[in-house]
Image (cartoon, helix red, strand yellow):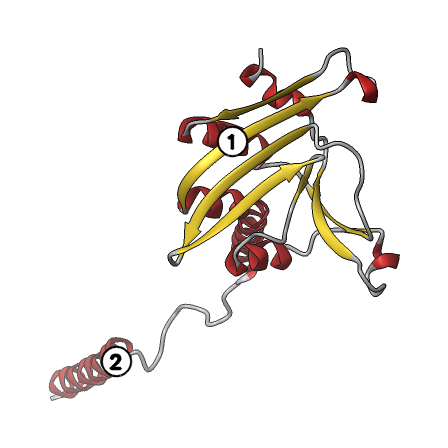
Amino acid sequence: MENQKNNKGVIALLIVIIVILSVLCVLFATGTITLKSNDVDNSGTNENINDNNQTNEENNDEEKESNWVDYLLSRHILDAKVSRIRSKDLGDTEDFSKTETITMDEVNEILSNFKNSKLTKTWSQGRGGPDKDHLTIAYENNDQKYEFEIYYGTIVVDKLDDELKNILEQNKYDEKNAEYKNMEGSFYFYSIDNYNETIFDKYFN
């Protein structure tokens, strides 16, 4: 009789254990309870995101500095010429005046030299002196003809299309001679830092 009572007690205990385990299994399966902590350390993820953002910003800055060249090369180039003038009266060793038509490959080569050059937005009320070396690229945008010019180591703005002007303006280059900005008759151009006219020598040798 006593053995029967013990057996019933053991069976009842096993049933209670089985019920508890079943309930726990259901709670784990439904996600009601979990052994994982909800406190996740996001510092590593945030650092990676910040690093990626910084890299993207640096890449965007590099693209921004060079995209005026890419834009120009993506236009329909109609004609490109390089002109050179030298005069003994102005201190040169010879009197010389010549204009050479250049190919699209040569346009790419010349402009690639300026792709990483820093530009400075320079204000002025006039420019004098001889036009010793002059690059002129005629191009089309939206069926309109425009001219990109470099002389005195500067980019002329007047004959550019509005899209190219906006690209140059949006780069927010450093300004020089800003005291002329609001004066009547003043204008600006973009000076090419470290410009060297020997880039054109091979066309005239």
The picture places residue 101, in percent across and down from the top left corner, at 47, 27
The picture places residue 32, in percent across and down from the top left corner, at 33, 82
Instruction: Tell me: 59 left or right of 118.
Output: left
Residue 166 against residue 204 in the figure, above or below: below
Q: Is residue 75 visible?
A: yes
**Residue in view at x 39 percent, y 70 percent:** 35
Residue 149 against residue 142 in the figure, above or below: above
Of badges 2 and 1, the one in the foreground is 1
Tell me the quarter of the picture where residue 204 sits. Answer: top right
Tell me which label, 2 or 1, sits earlier in the chain.
2
Residue 6 against residue 179 in the figure, above or below: below
Q: Amino acid at mark 1?
A: Lys
On-image quarter of the N terminus:
bottom left
Tell me the quarter of the picture where residue 93 sits. Answer: top right
Residue toward you, 163 or 24 = 163
Residue toward you, 120 or 54 = 120
Cα separation, mark 2 vs mark 1, equals 76 Å
**Residue in view at x 58 percent, y 10 percent:** 205
Tell me the quarter of the picture where residue 89 sits. Answer: top right
Instruction: Tell me: 51 left or right of 119.
Output: left
Q: Amino acid at mark 2?
A: Thr
Q: Which residue is labeled 1 in the image?
A: 81
**Residue in view at x 82 percent, y 53 percent:** 125
Mark 2 residue element: helix
The picture places residue 108, in percent across and down from the top left corner, at 46, 32
Q: Is residue 45 visible?
A: no
Q: Which residue is labeled 2 in the image?
A: 30
**Residue in view at x 70 percent, y 49 percent:** 189
Mark 2 crowd level (few <14, some 14–19, many ≥20, 10 Å Cα): few
